[in-house]
Image: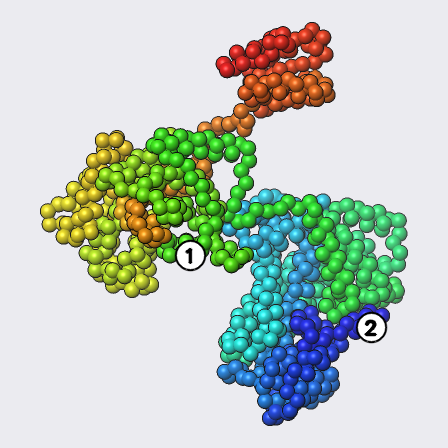
């Protein structure tokens, strides 16, 4: 009946896209092939020249049918093919069998060739790849489930599964997903342990998240590439090479999966209490030895290098089957190990295992076993037992057979049971899907990488910081500005140098190509130009977005706090003010020691000209120099010489300059000494004169002690034209740069006809928050999450009374909350936990006396006050 239902499915070539599942079903006789008449009617009716192809002798009938099927599909996609050739190939496919001919001819003039790869080789590559795609996708969930059973049987330490996606790229996404799915199997298990020490698990267990996660990743890549190829892309140039890359990854991932599976099976085998049992089960592993799998891997990779695609993909197909047998062997040993009890006892006592209905004692043992196994593992074991003993698995023999014969039969049953061609295999996959999905409703959602949630305590710190920042900005006469979170892509491109690759592009939703803003400076310049402003002092606090690799203190979504001055002012006046603002911000945020590194873009340009750097390479060499805070000069030198084409002499000359740093006026005097090369260059001479004005102003403002003149500071953004600076935290918390900025005189002019000079600063507030939170922990400080001044405590459930009293306080601008509960201690606990200083208590006694009880929570003193004077008394005690 199952076979008939499968064959009722018809795959119609030319009328629907060919999928890996369709190729698998047709190659294994599980579906019928038909040709779409409308597709054939569009082809030429005349026969072309004779074309022949030969099928390699070592291909299986499934591989052969898949190859011819894909060839037929590819020719249907070609308008130059003939209907006569399609009909010939269709007959070839229908009559393929293991004993049939290996060489065929048909007449068609539209068959292309791709360099040295013929049309049949391409079809065979894609057809067998489709079988691999279907087979590996089917193997994945089965291998997961079997490995989970082995972990239960081995009483494994599950510390290696304690993975969470923190958003900073610490773990691969698929590794975390594997760990999460395995936990569903282990939920409630009394067999496994969790020592919270990832190094305590054996490698056969600890490697599971990485190996099985990588297998999922590789299967996705193969599925994507196969889907492209089956959509009639086989004859595109380079398609064979692209597919071979995915296949090479699959072969290695299959080997790693087999290696860990075999290792666990050996551990299980060694843990069995009976020599006879170990001997019987050990004999079943001959077809799944890791050495033969390693040999298949070696053959497949060698064939790929030689571009012998059919031989390579055939070896990988054999490799997949060998890995499936390894997983089946592990499943057999894990099943026997977990069943334990009666089976092992029977073998130990040279008796036949009981396959008849279990006795009362057996039932009790089974019940105990169900209690100790995890929820998912129990459901899977029950399903396996029902399947193997139902007759489908042919394991329901009488007690007359020997234990050896029985276990041999079980090994064969697992091979049959875990075969994708078996009618019950789809039922097994559905069962595994149900087991994993059973936890979906309880599984917590995750954040995207590089983003964070902020709890109430963190928000208190952030609000305090934002308040300080806004106060400093307003103190200097700035007004607020807000701009869209996304801009036209053309607005952002070409402004950030090599960092332009980090811009988040949005999908085209209405004819405009847009991107999320990378910073707040370019949108500010666009706003100034668009509105024709010639003078503007503004601040903006908003989120920006970067397609970066998340790490500690490095996010994809984060706030920036910007202050910019645009317009013509006295020389170096705005530059002085923004640096002064920077020191005020960092001082008032009270984060600890820091320094402001400062340089001049024109001084850098002069330095590079002196060293002999070609002018067209100034900006790209600046990007290299900008990495000196993260890499050694030797690493930077290799980049400048090997990747950017500088000579070693020029790179060494740059090295002598970028090592210069020190107190501003001291280093400035050194650079302006008589005979200095910087004085002979127009750009650097101008820069030194401007810096002298700036340093004198900073000295008078008493903030030069925090400034360091550093010639290695480059700032990689293309739009800087003058002074550049960067603030670095010097405390124990490693976060890198916490603020940066500089002069950009030409940026506004890129958006309009007027050049409006500007200078600005951007505070990396997220990194500042990291420092502030760490300081809080170090000082053991706690902050109130709310500013509530009074808790209105109603000793009962009278909402109208609570609403009346709380509203009177709110109308008087008192920060208040209300709570309804008959138990006084609940109210007091709430006030203490939230550190609310005053309570307004009203119960039956207070109502009858026409008073309210005002309680000082810290001093634990109570005051009875007339109801009519409630607001007046509260405001007096709060100094309002």
**Residue occupying the point 59% across, 57% down:** 213
Residue 407 spot, x, y in % from top left: 78, 64
**Residue occupying the point 87% across, 63% down:** 399
Residue 664 versus residue 148 in the image, above or below? above
Q: Mark 2 points at which residue?
A: 4
CA neighbours of label 2 inside 10 A, class few (<14), some (14 to 19), many (20+): few
Nearest to N terminus: mark 1 or mark 2 = 2
Q: Can the viewer see residue 298?
A: no
Q: Is residue 837 left or right of residue 17?
A: left
> Who is closer to the viewer here, 28 or 601?
601
**Residue occupying the point 45% across, 38% down:** 770
Q: Which mark is residue 452?
A: none
Q: Which of marks 1 and 2 is in front?
A: 1
Image quadrant assignment for residue 342: bottom right
> Who is closer to the viewer here, 851 or 263?
851
Secondary structure of residue under mark 2? helix
Image quadrant assignment for residue 565: top left
**Residue occupying the point 62% across, 82% down:** 75
């Amino acid at each position: 009946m199952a076979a008939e239902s499968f064959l009722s499915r018809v795959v119609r070539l030319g009328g629907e896209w060919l999928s890996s599942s369709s190729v698998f079903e047709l190659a294994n006789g599980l579906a019928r092939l038909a040709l779409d008449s409308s597709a054939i009617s569009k082809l030429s009716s005349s026969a072309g020249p004779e074309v022949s192809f030969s099928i390699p002798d070592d291909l299986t009938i499934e591989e052969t049918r898949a190859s011819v099927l894909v060839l037929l599909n590819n020719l249907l996609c070609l308008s130059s093919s003939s209907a006569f050739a399609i009909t010939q190939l269709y007959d070839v496919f229908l009559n393929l069998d293991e004993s049939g001919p290996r060489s065929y001819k048909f007449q068609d003039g539209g068959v292309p060739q791709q360099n040295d790869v013929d049309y049949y080789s391409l079809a065979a590559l894609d057809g067998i790849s489709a079988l691999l795609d279907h087979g590996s996708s089917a193997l994945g969930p089965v291998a997961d489930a079997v490995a989970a059973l082995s972990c239960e049987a081995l009483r494994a330490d599950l510390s290696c599964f304690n993975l969470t996606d923190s958003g900073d790229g610490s773990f691969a996404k698929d590794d975390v997903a594997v760990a999460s799915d395995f936990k569903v199997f282990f939920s409630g298990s009394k067999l496994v342990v969790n020592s919270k020490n990832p190094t305590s698990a054996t490698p056969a267990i600890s490697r599971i998240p990485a190996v099985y996660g990588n297998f999922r990743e590789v299967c996705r890549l193969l599925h994507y590439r196969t889907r492209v190829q089956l959509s009639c892309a086989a004859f595109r140039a380079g398609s064979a090479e692209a597919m071979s890359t995915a296949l090479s990854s699959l072969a290695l991932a299959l080997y790693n999966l087999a290696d860990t599976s075999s290792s666990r099976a050996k551990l299980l085998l060694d843990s069995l209490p009976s020599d006879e049992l170990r001997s019987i089960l050990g004999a079943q592993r001959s077809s799944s030895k890791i050495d033969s799998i390693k040999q298949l891997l070696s053959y497949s990779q060698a064939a790929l290098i030689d571009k012998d695609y059919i031989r390579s993909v055939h070896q990988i197909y054999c490799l997949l089957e060998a890995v499936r047998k390894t997983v089946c062997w592990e499943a057999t040993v894990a099943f026997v190990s977990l069943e334990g009890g009666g089976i092992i006892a029977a073998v130990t006592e040279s008796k036949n295992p009981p396959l008849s209905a279990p006795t009362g004692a057996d039932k009790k043992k089974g019940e105990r076993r169900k209690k100790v196994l995890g929820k998912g593992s129990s459901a899977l074991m029950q399903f396996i037992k029902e399947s193997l003993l139902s007759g489908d698995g042919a394991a329901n023999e009488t007690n007359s057979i020997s234990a050896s014969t029985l276990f041999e039969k079980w090994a064969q049953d697992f091979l049959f049971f875990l075969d994708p061609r078996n009618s019950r295999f789809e039922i097994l996959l559905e069962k595994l899907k149900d087991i994993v999905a059973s936890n979906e409703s309880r599984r917590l959602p995750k954040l995207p990488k590089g983003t964070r949630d902020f709890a109430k305590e963190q928000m208190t710190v952030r609000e305090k910081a934002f308040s300080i920042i806004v106060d400093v900005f307003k103190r200097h006469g700035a007004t607020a500005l807000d701009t869209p979170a996304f801009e036209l892509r053309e607005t952002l491109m070409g402004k950030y140098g090599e960092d332009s690759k980090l811009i988040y592009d949005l999908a085209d939703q209405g004819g405009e190509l847009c991107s999320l803003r990378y910073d707040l400076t370019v949108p500010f310049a666009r706003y100034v130009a668009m509105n024709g402003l010639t003078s503007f002092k503004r601040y903006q606090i908003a989120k920006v977005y970067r397609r970066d690799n998340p790490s500690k203190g490095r996010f994809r979504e984060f706030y920036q706090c910007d202050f910019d001055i645009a317009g013509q002012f006295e020389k170096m006046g705005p530059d002085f003010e923004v640096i002064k603002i920077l020191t005020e911000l960092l001082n008032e945020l009270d984060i600890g020691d820091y320094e402001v590194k400062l340089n001049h873009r024109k001084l850098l340009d002069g330095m590079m000209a002196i060293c002999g750097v070609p002018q067209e390479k100034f900006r790209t060499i600046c990007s290299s120099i900008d990495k000196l805070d993260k890499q050694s000069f030797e690493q930077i030198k290799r980049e400048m010489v090997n990747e950017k084409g500088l000579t070693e002499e020029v790179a060494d000359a740059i090295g002598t300059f970028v090592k210069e740093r020190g107190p501003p006026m001291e280093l400035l005097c050194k650079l302006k000494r008589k005979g200095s090369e910087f004085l002979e260059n127009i750009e650097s001479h101008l820069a030194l004169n401007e810096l002298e004005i700036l340093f004198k102003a900073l000295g008078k403002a008493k903030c030069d002690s925090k400034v360091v003149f550093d010639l290695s500071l480059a700032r990689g953004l293309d739009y800087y034209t003058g002074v550049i600076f960067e603030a670095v935290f010097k405390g124990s918390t490693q976060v890198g740069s916490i603020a940066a900025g500089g002069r950009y005189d030409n940026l506004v002019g890129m958006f309009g006809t007027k050049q409006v000079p500007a200078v600005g600063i951007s505070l990396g507030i997220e990194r500042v928050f990291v420092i502030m939170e760490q300081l809080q922990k170090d000082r053991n400080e706690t902050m109130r999450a709310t500013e509530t001044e009074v808790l209105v405590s109603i000793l009962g459930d009278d909402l109208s009374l609570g609403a009346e009293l709380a509203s009177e306080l709110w109308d008087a601008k008192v920060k208040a909350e209300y709570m309804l509960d008959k138990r006084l201690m609940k109210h007091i606990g709430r006030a203490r936990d939230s550190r609310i200083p005053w309570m307004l208590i009203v119960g039956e006694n207070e109502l009858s006396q026409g008073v309210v009880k005002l309680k000082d929570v810290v001093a634990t003193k109570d005051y009875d006050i007339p109801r009519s004077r409630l607001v007046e008394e509260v405001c007096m005690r709060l100094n309002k």
